[in-house]
Image (tube, rainbow, N blue to C red):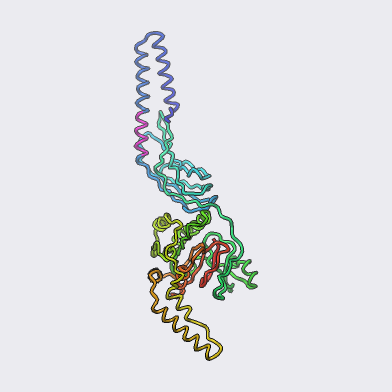
Amino acid sequence: MIRPTRTAGGVAALALALTVTALLIASPAAALAAGSLAIFLLWRGWRFERDLAAVAASLTVNRAVDRTILRQGAATTVRVTTTLTLLPGMEVRIRDVPPAVAAGEAPLCRPGETATYTLRLMAPGRTMFGGVILEANDAFFSRALLVSRLNAPSLQVFPAGTSATGGGRGAGVGETEIDRKTTLDGQSVRGFRPYQSGDDPGSIDWKVSAKRGTLHIRQLTGLEGGTPLIVVDLPARDGDPTTFARFSMAVSGAVEGAIRSRDGCSLLVVTSGEVVRFIPKTRDLREALQALGGLAPVEPRNPLYRAPGPAVLAARARLPAGSGDREKACLARLGGVLASFARESRSPFTAAIAAALTRVEATEVRLYTLARGDGSHIVQVIHQAKALGMRVVASAPDGAPILPGVDAVEVI
């Protein structure tokens, strides 16, 4: 709402005094002067509103947010720079309006300046900024105008999860030792390796070191060359919405972190025997997040538990040698049969996965799955990646079965 300044108040008081004088002494001159002052104030008010509308139309906002995907209660830093066409005689200051679910207040700044402030998102869901408040004044009037159209970017807030501890249940396949972290802070830790001379002592993980009896350090994501391939296994519809929300946040956070810290990443979304989406070697964060935005649990349609695929059959063909001649001959014949099946096996899903893995030229596959129900398609993805010499890191909820062939497991 438009508010008069002290100058406008003085003019209005003078017009009122002249009006009273004109009534008391019946002076036409006083009445004319009072009317002229009133018309002058009305004209100045109309002009102020017109100028303010022109300034608001020329306003542009460049709002940069450190993180657009956050956990409930997390803080992020916002930097806002505004530009506009300032008219003569008018002073303007601008204040950013945080989302309705955020705790924090932006400072006032002049056009062209950059305002920096921190906000904390207190409620889950997708939210937008409230726009900007334009505080303008001239010699006679002032007004605070909300410009709500300038509300980009949107923020995705996921419910605060609880840290998971403890080990998972083995799947009963293979004898490979798996690194399972009991607490995952973001998506920065890729795995563990023995401590070597010259390593940073601050990278030592004391829990893992105590468990194994020797010093082990944390390996962070991005220490090796190449862009990662992030594989997302969509769960079935009968799951818990809160678990899927944490799952979605972990995936989105991994994609955003990979794009911001590296030269991009590749994204592959699969479900039971189907490739849902595939984006190779992208550096466009908006494109990647839009690809993830519409994903939801699906109804499995093409389970592959009866179609293991050529990579799995080839692995089964590599049988251990027997102790006797007869056993050796039997195992060799069985391995030959399995090898023949592997050469002749044709699977559209496996062919699509192999083509995607070849195209991305990745050295590491980061697999995100809830590990529920039939996991035959995930087994094929892992075997195809291992056949190409890729490292596979699986991220799954605490207590999920360990998938055969993975090199490390992280807790979502």
Q: State the residue in front, 136 or 309.
A: 309
Q: Position of residue 98 (x, y in %)?
A: 48, 44
Q: How many marks?
A: 0
Q: x and y percent of residue 223 in the render?
A: 49, 68
Viewer-side residue, 37 vs 405: 405
**Magenta region includes residue 393:** no
Above or below: residue 56 compared with residue 38? below
- Looking at the rendered image, the quarter that the C terminus falls into is bottom right
Q: Residue at x 42, y 76 (%)?
A: 310
Quarter in which the N terminus is drawn: top left
Q: Main secondary structure of the magenta part?
A: helix
Q: Is residue 112 visible?
A: no
Q: Is residue 17 above or below residue 204?
A: above
Q: Nearer the viewer, residue 113 or 329?
A: 329
Q: Is residue 53 magenta?
A: yes
> In this view, which residue lies farthest toward the top?
25
Image x and y of residue 145, in percent: 42, 36
Q: Which residues are magenta?
A: 46-56
Where residue 56 sits, quadrant-wise, is: top left
Q: Residue furthest bottom?
A: 325
Q: Is residue 273 above or below residue 160?
A: below
Residue 307 visible in the shown view: yes
Image coordinates of residue 50 in percent, x first then y, are 34, 33
